[in-house]
Amino acid sequence: MDKQDLVTKGFLDVEIDSKVDFVSEINKLKKEKNAIVLAHFYQTGDIQDVADFIGDSLALSQKAAETDADMIVFAGVHFMAETAKMLSPQKKVLLPDLLAGCSLADSCPASDFAEFVAKHPDHTVVTYINTTAAIKALTDITCTSSNAREIIENLPLETKIIFAPDRNLGNYISGVTGREMVLWDGACHVHQEFSLERILALKKEHPDSKILAHPECRKAVLLVSDFVGSTSAILNFSKKDDGKKYIVATESGILHQMTKDSPEKIFIPAPPEDSTCGCNDCNYMKLNTLKKLYVCMKYELPEIVMDEDLRKKALRPIQRMLDISAKLGL
Ligand code: 13P
Ligand code: SF4
């Protein structure tokens, strides 16, 4: 085992016998180590299938807070594993590839955001969970795409609000709640890239389809969508709706559960502007592989380690979000 790999590659690069059956070894390691594997809907299908729990960012943080496992293996991106560590500091939290970051979190550097907050001293700071711990430490209340509307509506009408970092989600929530908010100008490179023209061309080809979109998409895409919601909301809609065909404007990993839950329905990934880039796949989410998951569980590396003072500061807005969500039954 060469820990130096973690610095340069983000994961442990060890030789593995080609005959190793990753799925059965991962299942064995789960039992041996009392470990739970949490996976986001954007992970590859093989990782979702071996996970103990698959969910959106709200459900995953709720699960991380309540699990009695000794080890949380997070098949997702860094801010998600970091949130799990904040909620369960006594547990070992692992991320198969430390370089699994998030362009949306990167679009909000802490020093710039601190200046922005200082310019609006009488504002309540609401930030999306897709942020670093340093941003959460500057936040009054966290939200996810599943509860952003309710979190904003829960604030007294006279509250002045800063919403960060996603401008598309912020605009959308401002529209549905009628609340004015000062927005940070950030975006996710995957959701920002969906092409309105190409989505409309697909719709023309499949007039019987419905367009489902994540609120991180641009306003023009949301305006032509039949349903807008978080990954789990999109998934639930596709299960309950009586339609047969859907154009899905979010990261393509979600299609795995959609197809599993409704094998008789047709799901078409929404195309990005550039037809050659494959950028409806999140390159960060897709850094995790079954092999890295296995190696990470076997060697218990890479581990999320946090400064305790920062952890406590960053935990406050997450705990507030979880308390409100529990009160509202979300
Ligand atoms: P949800 O999991 O809240 O749907 O958000 C998706 C996302 O962007 C995760 O990176
Ligand atoms: Fe971040 Fe976008 Fe990837 Fe989600 S899809 S992890 S918001 S870069």
Image (cartoon, helix red, strand yellow):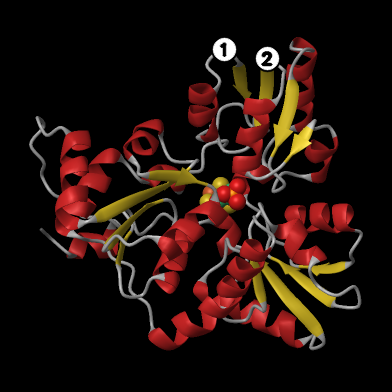
Q: Quadrant of residue 123?
A: bottom right
In the rendered structure, the answer to whether residue 191 lies left or right of residue 28 reads right
Q: Residue at x 75, y 60 (%)?
A: 150
Q: CA distance from mark 1 to mark 2?
A: 8 Å
In the rendered image, which quarter is residue 316 located in?
Answer: bottom right
Per the image, the residue denoted by label 1 is 264
Residue 243 spot, x, y in % from top left = 72, 17
**Is label 1 in contact with label 2 (beta carbons under 8 Å)?**
yes
What amino acid is labelled 1 in the image? Glu
Quadrant location of the C terminus? bottom right
- Horizontal side of 83 relative to 124 (left or right) equals left
* Three-letter amino acid code of the residue under disc 2: Lys
Residue in view at x 54 percent, y 48 percent: 56
Q: Is residue 7 or residue 269 the one in the foreground?
A: 269
Q: Which residue is mark 2?
A: 244
Q: From the viewer's perspective, is residue 256 above or below residue 6?
A: above
Instruction: Tell me if residue 198 can be seen.
Output: no
Q: Is mark 1 within 8 Å of ligand 1?
A: no
